[in-house]
Image (cartoon, rainbow, N blue to C red):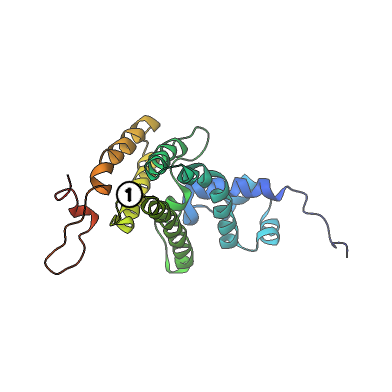
Amino acid sequence: MAERGRPRGFDREQVLLRAMEVFWEHGYEGASLTELTTAMGINAPSLYSAFGCKEALFREAVELYNKTEGISVYGALTASTAREAIAGLLRDAAAAYTGPGRPTGCMVVLAATTYTSKTVAVRDFLTEQRQGSTAELRARLDKGVADGELAPHTDTVALASYFSTVIYGMSLQARDGATREELLVVADAAMAGWDALVSGRPRIPEDGTTASVHEWQSTSG
């Protein structure tokens, strides 16, 4: 059956891209309906007709961000070794977060740093997105263990959390004006401790539990 009514008269993907840039720059709360419709080149009724509501538009914008900007960073995890994957991830983040002609930092990290009781669902949605990224990191580190590249007792949970924290900090620094070169220094500093974090055998405390990654350095070598 043919679709009834007048055609939208705009490219849905293009207006979604413009909305993504507004959310990326101003965050969910900071992006007003007027700013969104102005950037998208459509009126409010058209926005609601095409996307449903502001939150639904935001969720689609995050999905688009992950497929475009996000993949440019996390695609590094396909590298042949875990070390190359993490190093590439950090360096690609430094480039992606400071690219010319677009907002700085990571949209998924910065878009809902503040929230109200009405936007808890948005906060939780972005929390899930970030947790998913950390899980990707852990999966790549787990593969490093399975491949024999990393020590069998490597604390991949702690390592994934650590490198995620570095990436999130780089995002915030980029928003504060840090340059690509400055973020590359951060990336190199984080990787400088790689050998200490992933080599050696864990100390077995008196209670029989396995030591965490933070205790390895004193027992390795």
Q: Give the residue type that dot 1 points to.
A: Leu
Q: Is residue 39 left or right of residue 88?
A: right
Q: Is residue 142 above or below residue 149?
A: below
Extreme residue in the left direction: 206
Quarter of the rendering containing residue 39 = top right
Residue at image location 42% in from the left, 51% down from the top: 140
Extreme residue in the top direction: 181
User: For this rendering, which residue is in front, 57 or 68?
Assistant: 68
Q: Is residue 41 visible?
A: no
Q: Quadrant of the N terminus?
A: bottom right
Q: Is residue 195 above or below residue 141?
A: above
Q: Is residue 173 visible?
A: yes
Residue at image location 52% in from the left, 38% down from the top: 102
Name the residue tied to disc 1. 150
Determine the secondary structure under disc 1. Answer: loop
Q: Position of residue 24 (x, y in %)?
A: 50, 47
Q: Position of residue 156 (x, y in %)?
A: 33, 56
Q: Position of residue 210 (x, y in %)?
A: 21, 63
Q: Is residue 193 left or right of residue 181?
A: left
